[in-house]
Amino acid sequence: MIRYFTAGESHGPALSAIVEGMPAGVALTESDINDQLARRQQGYGRGGRMKIETDRAEVLSGIRFGKTIGSPVAMVIRNRDWENWTVPMAQFDDNSAEVQKITIPRPGHADLTGFVKYGFDDIRPVIDRSSARETAARVAAGSLARAFLRQLGIQIGSYISTIGPVSEASAPAALPELLDAGAESLAAEADKSPVRMIDPATSEAAIAAIDQAKADGDTLGGIVEVYITGVPMGLGSYVQHDRRLDSALAAAIMSIQAIKGVEIGPAFDNARKPGSEVHDELFAGGEKGLRRKTNRAGGIEGSMSSGQPIHIRAAMKPISSLVSPLRSFDLATLEAVQSRFERSDTCAVPAAGIVAEAVVAPSSPTPCWKSSAEIIWRRLRKGWRLIGKRYEYALQGKKLRREPEVFAID
């Protein structure tokens, strides 16, 4: 089971991530991590913070000679903006008398609820940990799982179908061809656009909408389309709630800041149609054997992968920090005031696609372990015999001439 934890504040010294459960022997390069971090920083409509930071991960443990070694992988991403925040975000020096407390919560943000929940007298700690800056650490963590999945032939990619009032009229004509080449081909095509849309005309309209929102002091949300290709039939299971593939993927997507909705395939559109227009008919025989001519289930049936591309759609709300503020009140005085502005983006939907790719990556291997128990059991028995052989040969001062390929699976 691959899992990860992140730590760090938006304006603290660094972000960190610990990834546990990576099998030993997975080949990795620095580019596998840092290229994903660079992708996250791109996108039209980003704020000034992206001009300050140049995110790069510093690996502290868990990788040797370009391969994972089975122990937890620890990484840090330094915050270059920290030098401007050493006083208000000091860890030990009590500078509270010098720092102006933030007591005006922003509507739609974690400000008010976090302030009350944790008993603060200043909203700053809530702002800094709930910030989407944290997703840089998650992208770094997800890049490890992506490398592992890629070596199993599984690829993850995304594109943007909606930004504010601008939507693609239908799925891109090139989508089937791009998915046949692997989801990373889809992502590469999307990355050619500053808003990560496939259709050039729609991209231009989205850019214009972002410009207008910025001029109005407003923000825009949108819809992210995530695809996973190369997934064999049968990952996940219907036998227990925590083994359902769609549940794991949906939970991962919903954990992203500002994501307020998720569907597998065109689920909400399917809900308005009769079953005869929704379910993917089955065909057998011919060169392709078992097949479906449609994929309205989004690649998952009965909470298990169907062997088709997995399709996840995520709805991102507009950013909560507005230059033209909404009404709020001061927690210190209860006086009605305008909400305050915290440096932010006009639109972060393109970056949300990169984050979505990252968070589904660690979620995908877990059902793989659980649903492939028979395969893993056979490998485990082979590995167990191998351990015995290693011990026997070590006592004799010998080495195995050839070792079978066995993943070290905890």
Image (cartoon, helix red, strand yellow):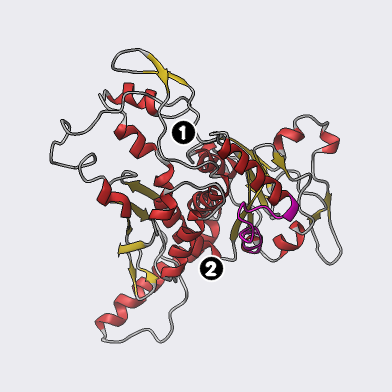
- Magenta-colored stretch includes residue 355: no
Instruction: Identify residue type, mark 2.
Output: Gln
Q: Nearer the viewer, mark 2 or mark 1?
A: 1
Q: Who's the residue at 83% across and 31% down the image? A: 274
Give the numbered dot on residue 123: none
Look at the picture and state if 351 lies above or below 324: below
The residue to which callout 2 is attached is 151
| SS label for mark 2 | loop
Residue range in magenta is: 185-201
Query: How far, Cα to Cα, is label 2 from label 1?
Result: 40 Å
As drawn, is 264 to the left or to the right of 327? Answer: right
- Residue 244: name its quadrant: top right
Quadrant (top left/top right/bottom left/bottom right) for the C terminus: bottom left
**Mark 1 — residue?**
321
Q: Would you say 284 lies left or right of 37 here?
A: right
**In the rendered structure, does residue 198 fall within the stretch colored magenta?**
yes
Residue 305 in view of the camera: yes
Residue 22's spot in the image, x, y percent? 41, 60
Q: Which of 23 and 214 is in front in this view?
A: 214
Q: Nearer the viewer, residue 21 or 218?
A: 218
- Residue 222 left/right relative to 329: right
Q: Where is residue 211 in the image (x, y as percent from the top left)?
A: 60, 43
**331 vs 262: above or below:** above
Identify the element where label 1 is drawn: loop
* Residue 381, position as x, y percentages in the image: 45, 65
Q: How crowded is mark 2: few (under 14 residues within 10 Å), some or many (20 or more)?
A: few
- Of marks 2 and 1, which one's residue comes earlier in the chain? 2
Q: In this view, does 392 lie above or below 87?
A: below
Q: Residues within 10 Å of mark 1 (few under 14, many from 20)?
A: many
Residue shown at 53% from the left, 50% from the top: 351
Front-most of residues 55 and 247:
55
- Residue type, label 1: Ser
